[in-house]
Image (cartoon, rainbow, N blue to C red):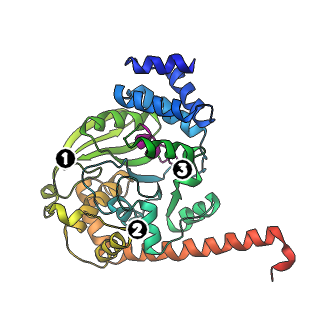
Amino acid sequence: MLTSLLAAITKGQDLSDRETSFVMEQIMEGAMSDIQLAAFLAALTTKGASQREVIALARTMREYSMNVPCSDDVFDIVGTGGGRMKTFNISTTAAFVIAAGGVRVAKHGNRAKTSRSGSADLLEALGANIFLSPESCLIMLEELGLCYFYTRYYYYMMKRIDVVREQMGIGTVFDVLRPLTNPAHAAYEILGVSEAHLVEPMAHVLAALGVRHGMVVYGRDGSDEISAAAPTTICEFTPGSFETYEVRPEDFTLPVAARQELEGGVPKDNALITRRIFDGEKSGARTAVLLNAGAGLYIGGQAPDFASGVRKAARIIDSGSARQKLDDFIVMSHRLGEAEKMELIADRDPEDVV
């Protein structure tokens, strides 16, 4: 059956929901060889994954991934990567502002793939411990209103799949699937995509996966976030409503950023950018964070509209609340990490623990 499905995709035929799920089951169970996996990913990339195929792939991948039982009001902000603009970690920086504004943020991410600093790299450079159990992440979400799920902990078989993807050297459907499979199954989400034609289809995919209010965004400078240097196309949606529109920094009386102001570097460089923003530096980088955090505060239910969210984001940063949220996150991540180590030691030999 697998051979016939690969042949169908190669001919440009869309698979049914059941056929698509079967292929993902074979991938996640390790029943596909590396050659078959590469052939499937290459053929699907050439054909172009249909909206129905992406939904079926994501649902099946979720079944094989760890589910962390959070409350149904959590929010995520994430990008697919692969954009032409190699920006600093805008969405991760914005997550601290959004959480400081009262939205419960269950962020998830990984190390760098298409840039020099992924969200995991940034958090480590800021001094946080990203290697926390689901139980510790839930404690952080409950007490701090913010947690971070490091993706390699939660997706079975992804290490092998990533090796194949890296050897292929091209974008694949997994670039889109990763952001769709937050272990918290966030009900509110902002997803950045790297291609304009993905905006509306991905909004329908997120709605089908249970997101109750969200945005899919594409910066027309090629960034997978709301851009501070160019117009951004947004599809905002609820389960029964989809509206596509465009925003610009000027719409929020914010200065347009120069592209070089948004460029990222290695993790320590991006960590410095984040800290400077939280310490009050006025720059194009701040504009980018205000736009994305403002959207998050709106989608997360802590602002009545986008513009109000942007203004609230500015107040949060200027009051020092975002910097305090970052500091608290770092301290709590290490405290919980140390508690996990002590628990492991106690489990191994209780008599050795004083």
Three-letter amino acid code of the residue under disc 3: Ala
- Is 126 situated above or below 16? below
Q: Which mark is residue 321?
A: none
Give the residue number, with chain letter if any, for mark 2: 100
Give the foreground label among 1 and 3.
1
- Whole-angstrom CA distance, mark 1 to mark 3, is 30 Å
Please tell me which of labels 1 and 3 falls first in the chain: 3
Q: What residue is drawn where x is 34% and y is 57%? A: 115
Three-letter amino acid code of the residue under disc 2: Ala
The residue range painted magenta reads 173-186
Magenta includes 343?
no
Point out the residue furthest to the bottom here. 354
Q: Can residue 16 be seen in this snapshot?
A: no
**Helix, strand or loop status at disc 2:** helix
Give the residue number, with chain letter if any, for mark 1: 220
- Whole-angstrom CA distance, mark 2 to mark 3, is 19 Å
Give the residue number, with chain letter if any, for mark 3: 184
Check disc 2: other Cα within 10 Å, few if <14, some if 14-19, many if 20+. many
- Whole-angstrom CA distance, mark 2 to mark 1, is 29 Å
